[in-house]
Amino acid sequence: MIVDPNWRLWLSWLAVLLVLSSLGWGGLARGLSFLLLLFVLTPALVTLGLRWWLRRQLVAASCPVCGFAFQGVLRTQTQCPRCGERLQVTPKGFVRLTPPGIVDVEAVEIPESQN
């Protein structure tokens, strides 16, 4: 016994195609079958292609400054979510864009107190 309600849709579609074919409208039946396959296969192929591309392009590594683990897209620049360091994503991991030993400091001006 078929319990899944989606089977009704597929069985109805098959019945329509068989009726069209038996009436001599095989070309219409083939056209509708092609459209159905197009609408079903296209999203599946796009999803598979996107997953394949992501597997090749995503790099999971740790920040060389603070050690925070995150992901980046290969051959792009990103910023560490924890420390804010600008990084280049390479196949081997993350590389600092600033030379080692340089620390970015944000200066804050303190107003003089009037005594």
Image (spheres, rainbow, N blue to C red):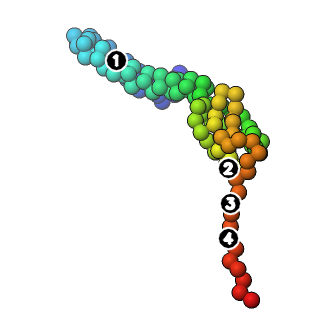
Q: CA distance from mark 2 to mark 4?
A: 22 Å
**Residue wearing tag 4:** 109
Mark 3 crowd level (few <14, some 14–19, many ≥20, 10 Å Cα): few
Q: Could you tell me residue 73's position as x and y percent?
A: 59, 34
Which amino acid does the dot numbered 2 rest on?
Answer: Gly
Q: Secondary structure at mark 2?
A: loop
**Residue wearing tag 1:** 33
Which callout, 2 or 1, points at the residue further toward the start of the chain? 1
**Nearer the observer, disc 2 or disc 4?**
4
- Quarter of the view holding residue 32: top left
Residue drawn at the location 74% of the way across and 89% of the way down: 115
Which callout, 1 or 3, points at the residue further toward the start of the chain? 1
**Nearer the observer, disc 2 or disc 3?**
3
Mark 1 crowd level (few <14, some 14–19, many ≥20, 10 Å Cα): some
Residue 20 drawn above or below residue 75 = above
Which callout, 2 or 3, points at the residue further toward the start of the chain? 2
**Residue wearing tag 2:** 84
Q: CA distance from mark 1 to mark 3?
A: 64 Å
**Nearer the observer, disc 1 or disc 4?**
4
Mark 4 crowd level (few <14, some 14–19, many ≥20, 10 Å Cα): few
Q: Could you tell me residue 43's position as x and y percent?
A: 45, 27
**Nearer the observer, disc 1 or disc 3?**
3
Residue drawn at the location 73% of the way across and 47% of the way down: 102
Which amino acid does the dot numbered 3 rest on?
Answer: Glu
